[in-house]
Image (cartoon, grey):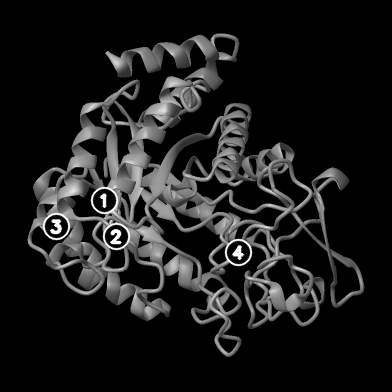
Amino acid sequence: MHSYLIVLGALGFLMCEPAHAQDRAMELASTLYGRHVVGYQGWFVCPSSPESGGKWAHWFRGEGKTADDLRVDMWPDTAELTAEERCSTGLKTGAGNEAVLFSSLNSKTVDRHFSWMKTYNIESVALQRFVSELTSSRKRAQRDIVLQNVVKSARTHKRAYFIYYDISGIEADKDLDILLADWERLWKENAIGQAGLYQMHRGKPVVGVWGLGFTSRAGSAKAAASLIARLKSGSGAAPPATIIGGVPTRWRGLSGDSKKEPEWADVYRSFDVISPWTVGRFKTPSTARTFWTDRIVPDMAETSRLGIDYLPVIFPGYSASNLKRKASEPNSIDRDCGRFYLEQVAAAEKFGARMLYTAMFDEFDEGTAIMKAAEPQNALPVDGGLITPDAESCDTANDWYLSLAGQATRMLQTNRRGGQ
């Protein structure tokens, strides 16, 4: 019944759209099969932004007055931003220009990001929502503003989207109730389904939960199982959902980054879609190939046997020296002019992946962003310890990784047409 009502709402909204737009929009949001999903943090805040509390978020530490306060390793390309989108930093680039940033609270900027997604054929967006922030009225208000921006831009550019909760920072089992209450509230307030493009899969709305079962995250297997069951069955105003589990890399054997209690085996296998976290687990194109053969292919075989879908995570590179205060370790996973990312795409094609998740669209903290980034080196703030996406001077354009992401989408579309 709930799924039927959601479809009716989508149809009602799309009645004024051209027939081809109606068909494409409905088809986009109907399934994860053949979809390329990008993670969208949407967590960058400038002191001048509404609801900011006069504070930076994620760009700088504290007041953010010097390059030493930076917590990102990459810098966005801001050339296309209008004056009202630009946040002053007080820093100068190597070329002598003012170094400016953007805020995810600005609806025009989020809309620009979604226009790029449309241009480069990125079809579905997983909006990150951190449970630890939802107890703060100021931070929750920020998260809600970003969500409103995403819903509006998804409608404008006909992109599908869904909520992906991250439990990082929770301290106890009871904190998982915050997630459930928030999910119910968003449905009660019609905050997520109103655009008619909320991502569906297996006839139900999609919700992701990242972090359950990691050795570095709180939460018992009993509490995790209860949360998944309640999300699956529907709770309050929220309909029954299809659950994506962002799980440890070694979920299958309860080793490595996974908790070891045997109850976790059943928890992992209760998800509708399993998406093991692979960022940082390999560092070169050759080790990416080996990882897929040794780790992901057996994962896919196991989930296929169980009737569970598998959402592989791919990423373009990694750099978090400013975030981790390790100035000696920039560009720790080199992008290799795009070859590192493309090797993962090729493996996904070879082994018949039915869906893909790129981490991430806008993650500048850990240097995994695929959106337009500043090039060349003199476009970056002086003495910030920042890198360009391809630090080894590959002469790539600022939209190179968006283009590669579009190739990944086309690969999935080809596989879908071929009956994969």
Distance (Cα) linking label 4 and label 1: 30 Å
Q: Amino acid at mark 3?
A: Trp
Q: Locate residue 360, reporting x and y percent.
A: 51, 57
**Nearer the camera: disc 3 or disc 4:** 3
- Vertical placement of 5 versus 371: above or below? above
Query: Is residue 147 something that shows in the picture?
Result: yes
Q: Amino acid at mark 4?
A: Phe
Residues at marks 3 and 1 touching, judged by CB atoms closer than 8 Å: no
Distance (Cα) linking label 2 and label 3: 13 Å
Earlier in the chain: of badge 3 and badge 1, it is 1
Where does label 2 land, which residue? 218
Where does label 3 land, which residue? 264
**Nearer the camera: disc 4 or disc 1:** 1
Disc 3 residue crowd, few under 14, some 14–19, many 20+, Cα 10 Å: many
Q: Locate residue 24, reporting x and y percent.
A: 49, 25
Q: Amino acid at mark 1?
A: Asp
| Badge number at residue 364 | 4
Q: Locate residue 212, reporting x and y percent.
A: 27, 55
Where does label 1 land, which residue? 173
Disc 1 residue crowd, few under 14, some 14–19, many 20+, Cα 10 Å: some
Q: Secondary structure at mark 3?
A: helix
Distance (Cα) linking label 3 and label 1: 15 Å
Q: Amino acid at mark 2?
A: Ala
Earlier in the chain: of badge 3 and badge 4, it is 3
- Tell me where residue 397 sits by quadrant: bottom right
Distance (Cα) linking label 4 and label 2: 25 Å
Q: Secondary structure at mark 2?
A: loop
